[in-house]
Image (cartoon, rainbow, N blue to C red):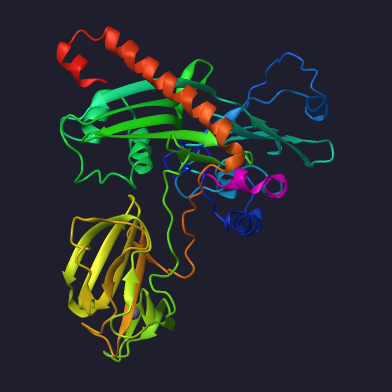
């Protein structure tokens, strides 16, 4: 969750980008001919930059720029502006992968000569990151990464829920990305669709990112607190010794819970996740989006994680079936049960390892087995291979440092809450705030 909801300055990977550029550069090389770029001669102040001095330009060429359009590549841009295809190739060769993963809205600036050689090029992938290319006398390119660091400023916000986390949060100007991250932090403990009550309160300190005095985005939530039906939950961001950031409760337990890999002990896996399996009963090709565990009827089945039962009943070919929601992103499904455990009723919370039902062969099943599914964000994943979220509590040796930091953060949040209180005229909201 630590990575979810964070501002993304770095574009997604487009693996084929480089090879595409290389191919299309070769393709367009032949039709590279006309060059009617209007250029003005400019008098420019002299830089003492050694790279700049090495550039073979008698006159300063004006900067040109363009915004990346959907489907753009470096070679397409070079073609559009009649720039040297060979230069496109040289720049692509010199550029790190992420510089060539162009996304709509990014900016490319360049200077070029009469012969359409690019003397300087700057690919601005975000407000913070730019890739600079400078042509050398040999016609090669020097590459330089220009990375700025945003100024992170903490911002306090709080709200009382009248309708929903998102509506009441938005009223307090809390950005949506932060609210999504906030919901994710507590997603293992609170069902934001069902558990929320009027009068629940939340407060948090998150980072706003500034560059040259202008807000350019949002950083991390540093501390978040939620009072849900009298339950007081707090999540604190903490970097461990290795520099990994995670959220913990005040006593050092991870906010993220973990999963067992298998819902049954000592069972044989009789069928794996396979998107092209021939169904044993239907005798048709049909994806098998789960893992089958062959076991005797009556073998107990355990919930693989803490969560909430969102379905327990008959479900077509699944027969007797239990579905459990874990946090905001994960669901597990258990099918063909002979019977349910009484405690695994719809709406009930279950603990990891708790028995929710027993192996059977209800629904479409050739023999007694458990059909188990693992879904992440609604997508079926191979439960035997999926990377399960890690949950590590603060280790013993790091506990004193964590406790000190946690107390400091909690104090900070409280002091912000009381400052807000003092500023608040409304008696009603005074009584609501703790
Ligand atoms: Zn199955």
Looking at the picture, tell me which residue is in the foreground, 281 or 108.
Answer: 281
Q: Residue at x 20, y 7 (%)?
A: 425
What range is drawn magenta here?
89-102
Q: Residue 38 placed where, x, y %?
A: 59, 29
Lateral position of residue 203 relative to residue 53, left or right:
left
- Considering the image in quadrants, where does the N terminus appear? top left
In this rendering, is residue 108 above or below 410?
Answer: below
To which quarter of the image does residue 429 belong? top left
Query: On the picture, is 248 further left or further right than 306?
Result: right
> What is the x, y in percent for residue 144?
72, 34
Q: Main secondary structure of the magenta part?
A: helix
User: How far across and down, in percent of the image, does residue 335 sit?
Assistant: 27, 75
Depth order, front residue of 140/155? 155
Q: In the image, residue 363 lies at what x, y percent?
A: 21, 82
- Residue 271 figure quarter: bottom left
In the depicted structure, whether residue 388 falls above or below residue 38? below
User: Which residue occupies 68% across, 26% down?
Assistant: 61
**Where does the C terminus fall, quadrant-wise?**
top left
Q: Quadrant of residue 27?
A: bottom right
**Horizontally, is 334 left or right of 16 in the view?**
left
Instruction: State how many labels appear.
Output: 0
Task: Find ligand 1 in the image and state its quadrant.
Answer: bottom left
Q: Is residue 410 magenta?
A: no
Residue shown at 72%/46% (left/top)?
94
């Amino acid at each position: 969750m630590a990575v979810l909801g964070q501002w993304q300055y770095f574009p997604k990977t487009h693996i084929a980008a480089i090879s595409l550029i290389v191919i299309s550069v070769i393709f367009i090389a032949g039709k590279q001919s006309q060059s009617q770029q209007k250029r003005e001669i400019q008098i420019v102040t002299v830089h003492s930059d050694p790279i700049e001095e090495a550039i073979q330009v008698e006159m300063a060429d004006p900067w040109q720029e363009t915004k990346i359009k959907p489907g753009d590549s470096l070679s397409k841009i070079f073609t559009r502006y009649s720039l040297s295809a060979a230069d496109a190739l040289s720049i692509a060769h010199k550029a790190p992968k992420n510089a060539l993963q162009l996304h709509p809205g990014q900016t490319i600036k360049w200077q070029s000569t009469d012969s359409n050689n690019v003397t300087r090029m700057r690919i601005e992938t975000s407000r913070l990151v730019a890739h600079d290319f400078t042509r050398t006398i040999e016609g090669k390119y020097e590459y330089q990464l220009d990375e700025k660091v945003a100024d992170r400023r903490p911002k306090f916000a709080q709200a009382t829920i009248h309708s929903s986390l998102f509506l009441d949060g938005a009223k307090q100007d809390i950005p949506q990305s932060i609210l999504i991250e906030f919901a994710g932090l507590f997603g293992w403990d609170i069902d934001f669709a069902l558990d929320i009550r009027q009068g629940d309160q939340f407060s948090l300190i998150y980072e706003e990112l500034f560059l040259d005095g202008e807000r350019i985005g949002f950083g991390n939530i540093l501390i978040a607190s939620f009072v849900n039906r009298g339950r007081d939950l707090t999540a604190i961001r903490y970097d461990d010794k290795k520099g990994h950031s995670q959220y913990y409760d005040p006593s050092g337990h991870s906010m993220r819970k973990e999963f067992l890999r298998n819902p049954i002990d000592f069972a044989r896996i009789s069928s794996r996740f396979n998107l092209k399996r021939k169904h044993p009963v239907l005798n048709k090709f049909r994806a098998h989006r789960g893992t089958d565990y062959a076991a005797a009827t009556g073998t107990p089945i355990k919930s693989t994680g803490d969560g909430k039962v969102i379905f327990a009943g008959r479900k077509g070919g699944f027969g007797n079936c239990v579905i459990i929601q874990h946090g905001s992103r994960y669901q597990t499904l258990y099918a063909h049960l002979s019977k349910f455990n009484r405690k695994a009723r719809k709406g009930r919370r279950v603990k990891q390892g708790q028995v929710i039902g027993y192996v059977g062969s209800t629904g479409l099943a050739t023999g007694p087995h458990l059909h188990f599914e693992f879904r992440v964000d609604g997508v079926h994943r191979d439960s035997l291979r999926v990377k399960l979220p890690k949950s590590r509590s603060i280790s013993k040796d790091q506990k004193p440092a964590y406790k000190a930091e946690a107390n400091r953060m909690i104090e900070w949040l409280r002091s912000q809450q009381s400052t807000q209180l003092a500023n608040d005229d409304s008696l009603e909201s005074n009584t609501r705030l703790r």
